[in-house]
Image: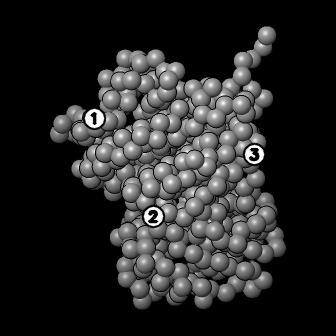
Amino acid sequence: MISSQYTKELCSRDSDAKIVLLVIDGLGGLPHPATGKSELETAQLPNLDALAKGGACGLLSPLGAGFTPGSGPAHLALFGYDPWQNQIGRGALSALGLGLDFARGDVAARLNFCTVDAEGRVSDRRAGRIPTEKGRQLCEVLKAVAVPEVEVQVAAEMEYRAGVVLRGAGLGDQVSDSDPQVTGVPPKPLSALAPGSERTVEVADAFLAQAAALLADEHPANMVLLRGFGRYPELMSMDEAYGLKALGIAGYPMYRGVAGAVGMDVEEVGWDLESEFALLESRYADYDFFYVHVKKTDSAGEDGDFDLKVRLLEELDEYIPRLLALQPEVLIVTGDHSTPSIMRSHSWHPVPTVIASQWTLADAAGEFSERGCSAGSLGIAPAASLMAHALAHARRLDKFGA
């Protein structure tokens, strides 16, 4: 379901205006106790600040006031899909992004390699962010898991993350996570959250038991956590909804998954800025809409590394002229959610946003930051309204009524 029931009917296919949506993962932050400034306020961002001064600014609320979003629903909202009505398990997005054999009836889950101590308590939920190559090696080990009457696929994603797809009769996706979200406690027992998912719990428990035995001598990744169970998603494509031929550019597989779930074309690319921007430039003539995802800012926030997040924002700022050189009719810079370094987690805080186009009236924002964008004309808006703004600025929405 598209967040606005009217958007699809009003979309015009006559415009050839291009839209670039740059999503800086975990963009929003909070003030550092020692300085009173957030990561965005601390960073030197001359190009983003110039965009803010010349564009329409505001703050986007991914799920509504007070709700902390996961990356999947936060992105669906940015693409104009009601995240409450279109819930997709994180595992399903990972499976799509990894290109696994994933179809209707299958159930996928996100797999995190973790470290447990001798008593089985989680001491590191991310196993020290093991290198992606190590994750691939461990996924090869896990391919020895065998569950009667069930086909199991495992593939590495990035660092400590992987995806698993389960195929068999009677599987449902309403299953709780084993990730306790804190250290010093054992993984949570899986449970069926609705009738019809009991078989999935049995299969997943068998997978976890075999994984524990197979990884017992590994270090630091000697166990796995399962989270985000989900079925294959079925959503209206962006072409159907908006008349847009769209390309998703994301180095991190899960975000290719969410792009693919809404009908974008996706191509495998490195998750460094140079690779992503080079792909954008090489395919710019071929599409109407471009989603470009930047991941590392979120990882820095989750690790509590304030200074690294500042440096990554400054590095990104240097690429903004390359976006402007393409002369998109609409350029939007935002984030999927906030990940304040001082919280080490996603948060409910609204996300700074700027829309730059020929049709924006420069408003009161003085810089691209949380407090700077709060002075802008967009106010605090639902993230799911962003696509309507994008289409309007691209002159792709027709007038309503006589």
Q: Is residue 277 left or right of residue 402?
A: left
Quarter of the view holding residue 261? bottom right
Q: Is residue 357 left or right of residue 73?
A: left
Specify the label residue 270 is tagged with: 2
Provide residue 199's location: percent of width, then percent of height: 75, 71
Q: What type is the residue that disc 3 sits on? A: Met
| Inter-mark Cα distance, 1 to 2 | 26 Å
Looking at the rendered structure, the number of numbered marks drawn on it comes to 3
Provide residue 202's location: percent of width, then percent of height: 70, 75
Task: Mark 3: give few (<14), some (14-19) or many (20+) Cα within 10 Å.
Answer: some
Q: What type is the residue that disc 1 sits on? A: Pro
Residue at position x 72%, y 60% in the image? 231
213 in relation to 320, above or below: below
Quarter of the view holding residue 9? top right
| Inter-mark Cα distance, 3 to 2 | 28 Å
- Looking at the rendered image, the disc whose residue lies closer to the viewer, 3 or 2, is 2
Question: Label 3 belongs to which residue?
Answer: 236
Circle nearer the N terminus (1, 3): 1
Can I make out residue 374 in this image?
no
Quarter of the view holding residue 84? top right
Q: Residue furthest right?
A: 169
Question: Label 1 belongs to which residue?
Answer: 46
**Figure quadrant of the C terminus:** top right
Q: Residue furthest front?
A: 285
Q: Residue furthest left?
A: 34
